[in-house]
Amino acid sequence: MKVTIYGSGYVGLVTGALIADVGNDVLCVDVDETKVANLKKGIIPIFEPGLDDVIKRNVEAERLDFTTNMDEAVAHSEVQFIAVGTPPGEDGSADMQYVAAVAKTIAERMTERKIVVNKSTVPVGTGDMVEQVIADGLTTRGESIPYAVISNPEFLKEGAAIEDFMKPDRIVIGTDDEHATNVMRELYAPFCRNRRDRLIFMSRKSSELTKYAANSLLATKISFMNELSNIADRLGADIEDVRVGIGSDPRIGYHFIYPGCGYGGSCFPKDVKALIATSRENNYTAELLQAVDSVNDRQKHVLFEKLMKHFDNDIQGKKFAVWGLSFKPNTDDLREAPSRVLIESIFEHGGTVRAYDPVAMKEMRHFYPDEKRLELVGTANDTLDGCDALLINTEWREFRSLDLAALKQSLNIPLVIDGRNLYDPAQMSEMGFTYDCIGRPGQHAKLVAVKSEKSA
C-alpha cells in the first residue's frame, strides 16, 4: 500500500518508518528542505532508540523516501496522513494552522479519492474543519472527488515508540466511512496479527477526545502523586510506602503513580492545556484539569525550593551539579522539561550549573547557545568536582548506582537533592549525606556548612 505522511517530526517519522518497515511504500513530506536533505542521508533530527536503524533500512530498501514536493506528495497515495505540529497558543489552545495548510494542499491537488488521516493530536472537531477545508478547495476548483477525513490518534511513548507502534495495546480510528474503515483495517493488519480487537472504531469526535482523555488522565495521576508527596513531606510520611500501598489495589495499579519533579515533554502539558481551552470554548470550566496543570507547574519548582532552604535562600556564587536534562529517560526532548525551570531559577539567584545528560546535551545547548553560567560536560562524574550540591532531574539508568564515597569526596557539601527518588534515604544518611528527595523522610533540616576536607 502507498502512504503519504505530512510532517517529518517525531510522530511523522515513527509512523512513516514503521509503516514502511512492514512492506508499504511511504513518502514523508516536510517543508524544511534541510531536514529532508538530511533525512535522505540518514541524519535523524530526533533521538528515539532504534529509529535511525529502521529509517536507514527502509530508505535502502526504497520503501521510504522524503520530499518537499507537494504535487508528488498528494499524487503518491490514496492514504494521506497529517502528522504536523499543533503547538499551544498563549491561551493554551492548539494552533491548527499547519493542519489546515495540509488540508488545503491536498484539496488543491487531489485528482482521485483520498483518505485523509488526522494523526496529529488535535482538538475535538478538527475533523469537521479539515473536511470543510477540503470541500471548499474542491468547490473552488469546480471538482467533485470522493474523500474521507478520519481520526487516528497516536499513542507513542517517547523512548519506547517503536515497541508501542509495532505492538500496540490499541489502535483508535474515528470514522463512519465504510471504504476508509476497510483501508485502515488492511493498513494496520500487520500490527494486529495476534489480536484483532486492537482496532477500535468509533466516531471521529470520540476518537479525537480519546487522545486528550488518555493523556489528561495520565497527567492527573502524576499530579495527584506529586500533590500527595508534598503532603507526605509535611507529615513525615513516606510516599514510597504510600505508592506501594495504593498501587497494590488493582483498581489503581502502579502505572504513573511515581512522584517526581513534574511532567514535561510535548504531550502532557500541551494536551492538558488544550483540553482546558476546548472546554472553555464550549462553556465548561474543567476545574480538575486546571488543578492538574497548576500542580505540575508548581512541582517543577520543588527542587529549587528545597535547594534554597539548604542555603538560607542565598546561592550567590554557588555552583551546582545537575544530572538529567531531558524530561524523561531515553529521549533528548527538553520541551517543558523540569530541568530548565530549575536551572533558570539557579541563574536568576546568582548560581551557576555544571550539567550532564546522556543524550540531550546538544539540544540543551540549542536552548542556551550563549549561556556562560551553564557548563555541559561529558560524564556524570565530570559535573561533581567543586560543586556545592548535586540535583537530579531525570531517572536515567546510569544514575541509579552511585559510588557514594567518591561522590562525597567530590562535592564541597554532601548534599543531594533528588527529584526522582532514586536512592535509599537511610543509606544516604549513613554515608553522611544530606539527602532531600520527593515525599520521603530524611535529613530535611537546614544544612550548616558541612564540607569535605577538600573544600575546608
Image (tube, grey):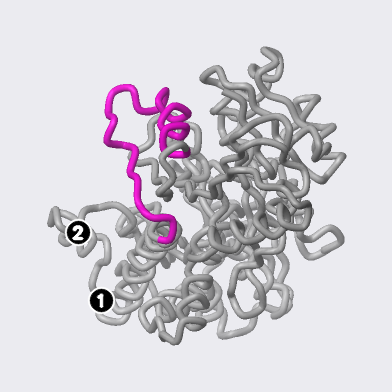
Residue 95, position in %: x, y? Answer: 66, 67
Secondary structure of the residue carrying tag 1 is loop
Above or below residue 137? Residue 269 is below
In this rendering, position of residue 123 left or right of residue 233? right
Residue located beneath label 1 in the image: 236
At horizontal 68% and vertical 43% (from top left) the residue drawn is: 6
Residue 239, position in %: x, y? Answer: 27, 66
Residue 404, position in %: x, y? Answer: 46, 48
Q: Quadrant of the C terminus?
A: bottom right
In this rendering, position of residue 209 left or right of residue 99? left
At horizontal 56% and vertical 85% (from top left) the residue drawn is: 312
Pair 2/1: label in front: 2
Which residue type carries mark 1? Gly
At horizontal 19% and vertical 59% (from top left) the residue drawn is: 252
The disc label shown at residue 252, or none: 2
Which residue type carries mark 2? Ile
